[in-house]
Image (cartoon, rainbow, N blue to C red):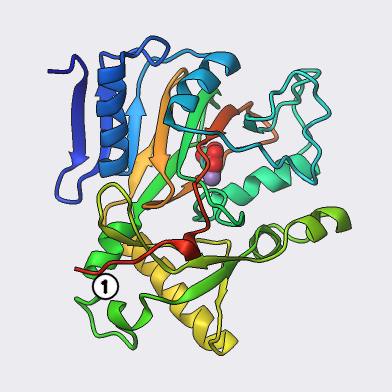
Amino acid sequence: YMSMKVDIKYPEQEFYATISEVDVKSISDGDFLELRKVVESCGITVIKDQEVNDEEQIAFSERFGELEISIGTNHKRENNPYLKPQISRISNVNIANDKLIPVDDHKVVFDRGNNWWHTDSSFKEIPAKISILSAREIPEEGGGTEFVDARHALETWNSKPRKYSVEQIKDDITEHSIIYSRMQNTGDIFNDQFKKDMPYVRQRLIRTHPYTKRNAFYAGSHCSHIIGWELEEGRELINEINEWIVNSGEIARHKWSNGEIVLWDNRRVLHRGTGYDESKYRRIMHRTTVAGDKPSYEEEVILH
Ligand code: OGA
Ligand code: MN
């Protein structure tokens, strides 16, 4: 059997695993397969004590598949020639001079948008599979990350009186936009070019996971409206779904330690940052993101 130790914190939801006795830099093919299964069946997986640099993080992440290229903010990637295109740096520290970035700077405001429940890259035509976040420097206070279970939410949706059952909405298509979500949450922070390059994209409201074959809602803060629905009616349902994702099950509250890696499956969970005093503390997180294979609207949904 595998040498890794797996502990599942919320077994009733099969949610939030912690893995130990593994090194992502030298993980065997067998252990990697097992790790991948844990991530896809548990939604979020914490691996403690994994000090990696960007090259090592990319090499490990690429074992899951092709990686996304980071969009940066307004396509500016901190003007840094050393930040690899596969790395999304979520940070209030300027990589070029190692100083704190002012809290009203576009970069810090953009990253603050992560504090609203979302699923990574749902604003891209082909949304992300798995995100891999490495804690390089954590603040003394705050700066946690929280996760909720959109699969549990779907599986318990019909347990309450609803205007729309899962069966009725299983084929609905929504539109997502990062301009829309940031506009709601942090204000208008984008230049015209970025807005042009980031149009609304279509996504399924319900997705069947290709590995577990279980269904989950697919919404979060980038999700604006439902195609073919009256705007307010669609937004009401999206709000109800987002609230149910947050309130129906456990909230996995992750408090970071330095050197930790957390992986989550964006097809199954929503996540958010909890915020911290950006004017006082440094926080450096580097994310790699495993790209999806096709647009979600090309996927098939199978209800059981
Ligand atoms: C992310 C994200 C939240 C955080 O990296 O995708 O949303 O706590 N991060 O940094
Ligand atoms: Mn995110």
Foreground pick, 85 / 118: 85
Regarding residue 22, the answer to whether it shows in the image is yes
Crowd band around label 1 with a 10 angstrom C-alpha radius: few (<14), some (14–19), many (20+)? some
Q: Residue at x 29, y 80 (%)?
A: 167
Q: Work out whether 79 lies above or below 136.
A: below
Q: Work out whether 182 lies above or below 90.
A: below
Q: Residue at x 33, y 51 (%)?
A: 210
Foreground pick, 14 / 113: 14
Q: Residue at x 46, y 17 (%)?
A: 259
Q: Which residue is mark 1?
A: 157
Q: Quadrant of the N terminus?
A: top left
Q: Quadrant of the C terminus?
A: bottom left
Q: Quadrant of residue 254?
A: top left
- The residue at the far top in this view is 26
Where is residue 261? Give x, y as percent: 43, 25
Q: Quadrant of residue 186?
A: bottom right
Total marks placed: 1
Q: Ligand 2 falls in which quarter?
A: top right
Where is residue 96? Give x, y as percent: 80, 19
Q: Residue at x 66, y 58 (%)?
A: 178
Inspect the image, locate mark 1, and give the three-letter code of the amino acid beneath it: Trp
Residue 229 lies left or right of residue 304; in this view the side is: right
Residue 56 lies left or right of residue 237; in this view the side is: right
Where is residue 192? Give x, y as percent: 87, 58
